Image: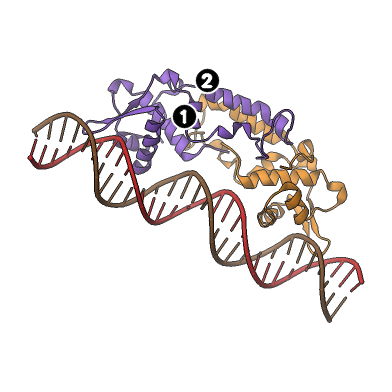
Chain colours: A orange, B purple, C brown, D red
DNA sequence: ACAAAATACTACTTAAAGGTAGAATTTAAA
DNA sequence: TTTAAATTCTACCTTTAAGTAGTATTTTGT
């Protein structure tokens, strides 16, 4: 019952970049060191974020990364979706195929409220909300 | 952001058994077939549940499994704990070591409410509450 | 032109969860 | 006593996430 490492890293990376937008670009080296994320793993994640149009990368000597759009327009759920973290939303918590109000699994009623609360939180929280330096270890 | 297969299976198995307590014992064969859980994987899980004192097993010809205590006294959280699903409760959602009200990660404030809601749900829901046949696929 | 510093790409290795196989053990009925 | 049907145990295989390595490419300053 937790996020994938990749997703956790992605959120921390994006939140950190959002908080350093004035400095124009963040390099993989800087991100890796300040967030203590393995360099090679980080660059792999950055490629995903670039492909997801969340990040723009500038190659070459003074290159680096920056957000592809305003921090206020990037929600946590949008990030998670690119790591397949919430695609199973419609699936029930017990993994018994689809689970809705007509055909409920035994935990359905208890799970509905917490699930919707998490969902709403991820949907309404943007990078601007969490932009800070509190992503270090 | 979902439970391990083992945990999902465990909850379904225990919920099903709770609903069939009158019939005294459930066999691995019956459980595997009605819940469509791979037989060999199921027996592996049953061993864990036996070791966790949630299940009592009777070996030999007419053997099988039954709850080790009243369904009303077994909470979901107790089940999950044996699969290390909520031991990371105190860890923050972003995996940045300990995360409390003094030293918060950037998502701390948003995560507190949903987290406690899930926790409470898992703590207060017992096998009796969810005991039913709605565990099939 | 060249070197330095950055990202991109491809492939490989490791760790953990998920799942499978087969033999051993236990019990009860015939 | 034998057989059948059940759990237990140990070892193995497969899949996926996590992490590592090396090379290629791009860009800028000298």
The residue carrying mark 2 is B124
Total marks drawn?
A: 2
Residue at x-position 68% and y-position 43%: A78
Mark number displayed over residue A2: none
The residue carrying mark 1 is B79
What is the chain letter for disc 2? Answer: B
In the rendered image, which quarter contains the N terminus of chain A?
top right
What is the chain letter for disc 1? Answer: B
**A125 displayed left or right of C18:** right
How dense is the environment of label 1, judged by Cα within 10 Å: few (below 14), some, or many (20 and up)? many
Q: Which badge, 2 or 1, is on the more N-terminal residue?
A: 1
**C30 displayed left or right of B8:** left
Q: Quadrant of residue B11?
A: top left
Front position in the image: B123 or B34: B123
User: Is residue A96 in view from this perspective?
Assistant: no
Tag 1's secondary structure? helix
Horizontal and vertical percent for residue A63? 81, 60
Same chain? Circles 2 and 1: yes
Q: Quadrant of residue B39?
A: top left
């Amino acid at each position: 019952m937790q996020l994938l490492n990749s997703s956790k890293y992605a959120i921390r990376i994006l939140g950190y970049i959002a908080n350093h937008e004035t400095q124009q670009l963040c390099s993989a080296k800087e991100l890796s060191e300040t967030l203590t994320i393995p360099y090679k793993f980080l660059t792999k994640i950055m490629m995903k974020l670039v492909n997801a149009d969340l990040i723009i990368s500038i190659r070459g000597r003074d290159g680096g990364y920056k957000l592809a759009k305003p921090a206020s327009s990037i929600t946590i759920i949008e990030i998670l979706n690119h790591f397949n973290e919430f695609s199973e939303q419609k699936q029930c918590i017990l993994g018994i195929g689809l689970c809705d109000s007509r055909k409920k699994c035994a935990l359905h009623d208890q799970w509905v409220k917490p699930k919707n609360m998490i969902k709403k939180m991820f949907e309404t929280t943007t990078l601007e909300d969490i932009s800070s330096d509190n992503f270090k270890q």
